[in-house]
Amino acid sequence: MAGHPTQQKILDETIRIIETSGEASVRVHDIEVAVDVTAPSIYHFFGSREGLVIAAQAERLLRSLKDFDAMSVAIMSRVRNRAELREAVSEILTLIYDPSRSVARQQRLFALGSAEGRPDLALVIGEAARDFLHRLAVSFQIFKDNGWIRSDLDLDAFMQWLAGQILGRVYIEIGREPSAHPAWDAISQEAVAFVVFGSLSDD
């Protein structure tokens, strides 16, 4: 979201504070000192402390989506047939469910939760998430055209469902140290395979 280098530094520091100590710990003076800027500069870019927090929360979600986008594009670019597509989908899910991504998943949930009572933030986050999911749906159209996935699958609806299904993993992660949950992962893998391919295997 940021364009100017100073604006980016302010955003980075605000995000660091939110992820380290929580949104309530964001103080304009602390950011002035950490980034070596003046309060007028912060207000110039963000309007107010609230504007700064909104921008930081939105940026947190956008960075999370971009991280997933880069990972999925690298894997999906190798797909040449239906069997490889099935393997690629399974590989992406396995990476997503790795315990190392537990914190990022919870941070995404907290960023979404921060939109409560903030219509401006809800608008930014909602548009960014819908645009991201639509782009994923479009990227899957070629596989549908090739007959590698169900012909009746609504790709936009699928991506929206998948995003919610993945985020639902926080129910077994929140408040705990990151750890593996193979039973949950197996159910998720089976559900996604059936929705996308209409079967659990090509055998």
Image: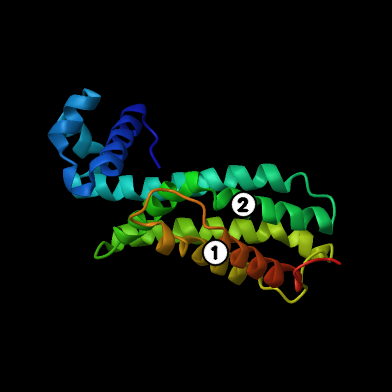
In this orientation, does residue 37 appear? no
Tell me: 147 left or right of 193: right
Image location of residue 152, percent across then percent down: 74, 77
Tell me: 80 left or right of 177: right
- The residue wearing badge 2 is 94
In this orientation, does residue 136 appear? yes
Name the residue: 61% across, 55% down.
Answer: 93
Image location of residue 30, percent across then percent down: 16, 32
Name the residue: 61% across, 56% down.
Answer: 135
Tell me: 22 left or right of 200: left
Q: Quadrant of the C terminus?
A: bottom right
Q: Nearer the viewer, mark 1 or mark 2?
A: 1
- The residue wearing badge 1 is 184
Instruction: Look at the picture and state if 139 lies above or below 184.
Output: above
Image-quadrant location for residue 10:
top left
In this view, the residue in front, 51 or 83, is 83
Q: Secondary structure at mark 2?
A: helix
The amino acid beneath tag 2 is Thr
Task: Give the image's coloring scheme.
Answer: rainbow
Residue reaching furthest to the top: 36
